[in-house]
Image (tube, rainbow, N blue to C red):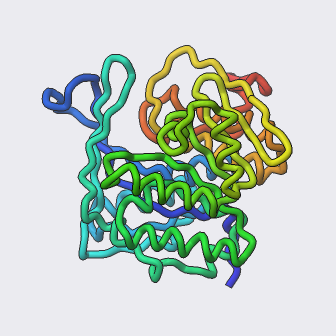
Amino acid sequence: MYYVVEVVTLGETMILMNPRETGNLKYIYDYKKQLGGAESNFAIGLARLGHHSAWISKLGADPHGQYIKAFIQGEGVDTSRVIFTDKAPTGLMFKERSVLNESKVYYYRHGSAASKLTPEDLDQEYIAQAKYLHLTGITPALSQSCYEAALEAIKVAKENDVKVSFDPNLRLKLWDSQEEMKEVMLDLFSKSDIVLPGIEEGELLLGTTDPEEIAQEILNLGAEIVIVKLGAEGALVADQDSMKRVAGYKVEKVVDTVGAGDGFAAGFIAGQLKGYDLVESTKLANAVGAYAITVLGDMEGLPTMEEVEIFTGDKKVVTR
């Protein structure tokens, strides 16, 4: 059977309780229910940029799980391979925002439905027909079976010439030890075609904050392309032939930084799908990531291509 899906991703999406005001959660009583999940953010970001994306996961057979699937499907993402189970609940997370625009997250995901994902839950033919498989370092941290599922997805991708992109997206709270985290991440770097680390991740995993050194270390492990995220400064994109810094976009008011990295990844892969070169793909990634931080919520600020073009000045806005 043939499926028209360009990019497949898999991972956990939770109910996100987002406070309507800043401050210690002990004193917060009013929340907005939203979604929280790096991989679904990425899939939604791609869909808004005009590409066919799919999200694979396992959800609790509860109202929260039903809401998550319906919402993501409503954003134009294929959720046909999402599984429901009555053996575990949908995960939950609370966000805490300070007056300095920094966020903390409190997880209630231990034993969640998504943590029960196994290699047997994957439709191999479905993954095999895609152009890209996108994974993050969150999924292998959830459970051993999730780690095995991620490895199986990579195996299927490699056997069928599907490019593997990988965002470390480190969540220290999910790992028993940094040594285990480092071992797993470096192994996944070596199995990936495209790796998208940040500076802090480079320091934790490779012992350096130098973007060029981070990129070279990951290229030496076997990756074809490395894009090192530099925050407001933009990004460094590298392959075996070159390393280039690509300037970022200035944002006057930062509202919510969570989800910016997922948008960045979506922008880069969208650029590759559109036939852009590495620099142009990175420019698109920078623009999507910058746009995302102007809106409250993990994926609410992910833009369409038209919004990107207006944001970057490539298209004039028409209001009447």
**Relative to 58, does residue 298 appear above or below in the rendering?**
above
**What quarter of the picture does the N terminus occupy?**
bottom right
Residue for point 56% across, 65% down: 78
Say which of 161 and 29 sits in front: 161
Residue for point 18% across, 29% down: 28
Residue 8 location, x and y as percent? 60, 64
Residue 95 location, x and y as percent? 30, 37
Residue 177 location, x and y as percent? 33, 52
Left or right of 69 in this view: 104: left
Residue that protrudes farthest toward the top in the picture: 252
Left or right of 37 in this view: 252: right
Q: Quadrant of residue 247?
A: top right
Residue that protrudes farthest toward the left in the picture: 26
Say which of 213 and 58 sits in front: 213
Q: Quadrant of residue 211?
A: top right
**Relative to 246, does residue 10 appear above or below in the rendering?**
below
Say which of 102 and 214 sits in front: 214
Residue 271 location, x and y as percent? 75, 46
Residue for point 55% across, 61% down: 187
**What quarter of the picture does the C terminus occupy?**
top right
